[in-house]
Image (cartoon, grey):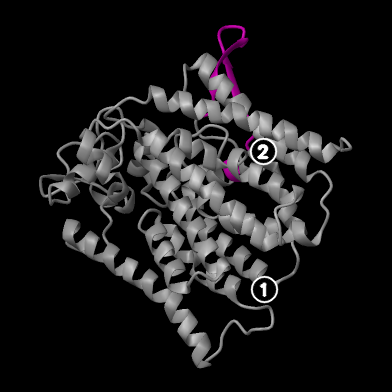
Amino acid sequence: MAITRERVLLAIAFGLGAVLLAGLVIAGLREAPLSNSYALLADAFLNGRLWVEQCFDPDCARFQDRIYVIFPPVPAVLSMPFVAIFGIDFSGFIFMGTALYAASIVLWSRILKRLQSGLGAPAMILLLAIAFASPLYFVTIRADGVWFLAQSVGFFFVSLSLWLALSGRGLVWAGLALGLAFLSRQMSILYLPFLFALVLADDEPLISFRREHIVRALKLGLPVLAALAVYLFYNYARFGELTNTGYEFMFKPEGGLAVLDLRIENSGLFSPDFVLFNLSYLFLQGFDLNFGGPDLLTPEGMDWAGTSLIAASPFVLFAFFAPSKRVVWIGAATIIAMVVPILFYHSNGFTQFNVQRYTLDWLPILFVILALTLRTRKLEGFGLFVVVGISLNVAAMAVLALIQGGL
């Protein structure tokens, strides 16, 4: 078998990926208890209530003398069996996230195989990019935190919905998976038109009043609408209003993020004040190793606001070569609809290193677009850009382990 540059890049990517997997195991073994508020919410569900008695994270609400975890409920539901056995000091969230991570990668191997009519070298290098050069790895190794576990669960259910739709296993099941994704990460509901476009044949119209077309739309959409109804009722049961998610009742526990507290106090949750910062960190900010000391020669850590998507995951730039297909344009429109509101949000994903983790909400769409691109074009340099992304993740984890003692 001839040694080609493609095989060399695959070997390097696998080797670096093995290092990152070892990091997951180490982080899981070192996880401290009482760090994830989803344990508290799971305990509340087990005891027939929606409120918690304390909070481990800055993002909690106090309403009518009760404390609430403001995040959607599905990650807590998944945590209930473990909390039932080990109590609220359950310290296996990173391993729980790792199981979801592994399941997501298996799903993506099947998604890419279907999109590319096989799992050849281009699809394999894209799979390695998803696993080790995207924010998916970071949210997994930080699954001991409530924010990161929610993203890990949301990514899994979005991936499941894509596979169910593409595999012909049933649009109802695909809609149900998307509904569960929405009950983990609210932005996931915007996937609905993209998912519907993905299951249509190229010669089928997007909008039609034929019975078959309407039935398919209802099969996919009704489970999502049911999930939306559950969420609205969940809000009403907690805060007395269908659309009130509790952010207006957030309080500042000891150890909160002072920067974000000041932003909310001065500008609110959403404001044009945040656009320049969020745009810079989404597209421009590079790998930032901070140096200190009087001579600025002492490495002290990394920028906690993260690295831009283009710098940390440069392979995404190849989506520029995507074929001009309806599903690609609908996917691009969906991404824009998800990105624009977040530019006005007070947080770009604190705390994070070498990622912009909010991009994980829409990156599955970009992964599909990249798969379609790799099927129609031979993209020279794609594998090299993936290896660069994985290398940066390894470098970031090494810096954090050596300088800060870990994440």
Nearest to the observer: residue 30 or residue 320: 30
Q: Residues within 10 Å of mark 2 (few under 14, many from 20)?
A: many
- Pinpoint residue 61: horizontal percent, then vertical percent: 23, 45
Q: Kindly check if marks 2 and 1 are in contact, taking CB atoms under 8 A apart as contact.
A: no
Q: Amino acid at mark 1?
A: Arg
Question: Which residue is depicted at the point 23% across and 48% down?
Answer: 249
**What mark, if any, has residue 326 been given in the picture?**
1
Q: Is residue 407 visible?
A: no
Q: Amino acid at mark 2?
A: Ala
Q: Is residue 217 visible?
A: yes
Q: Is residue 319 above or below residue 151?
A: below
In the rendered image, the residue lying farthest to the right is 2
Q: Residues within 10 Å of mark 1 (few under 14, many from 20)?
A: some
Element type at mark 2: helix
Q: Is residue 50 above or below residue 218?
A: above
User: Residues in magenta?
Assistant: 280-303
User: Does 266 lie within the magenta span?
Assistant: no
- Pinpoint residue 131: horizontal percent, then vertical percent: 59, 42
Question: Which residue is depicted at the point 76% across and 42% down?
Answer: 383
In the rendered image, the residue lying farthest to the front is 1
Instruction: Tell me the distance, in whole angstroms, between the alpha carbons under discs 2 and 1.
Output: 28 Å
In the rendered image, the residue lying farthest to the top is 294
**What mark, if any, has residue 311 been given in the picture?**
2
Question: Which residue is depicted at the point 17% across and 62% down?
Answer: 240
The quadrant in which the N terminus is found is top right
**What mark, if any, has residue 372 been given in the picture?**
none
64 relative to 22 in the view: left or right: left
Sequence-wise, which precedes: disc 2 or disc 1? Answer: 2
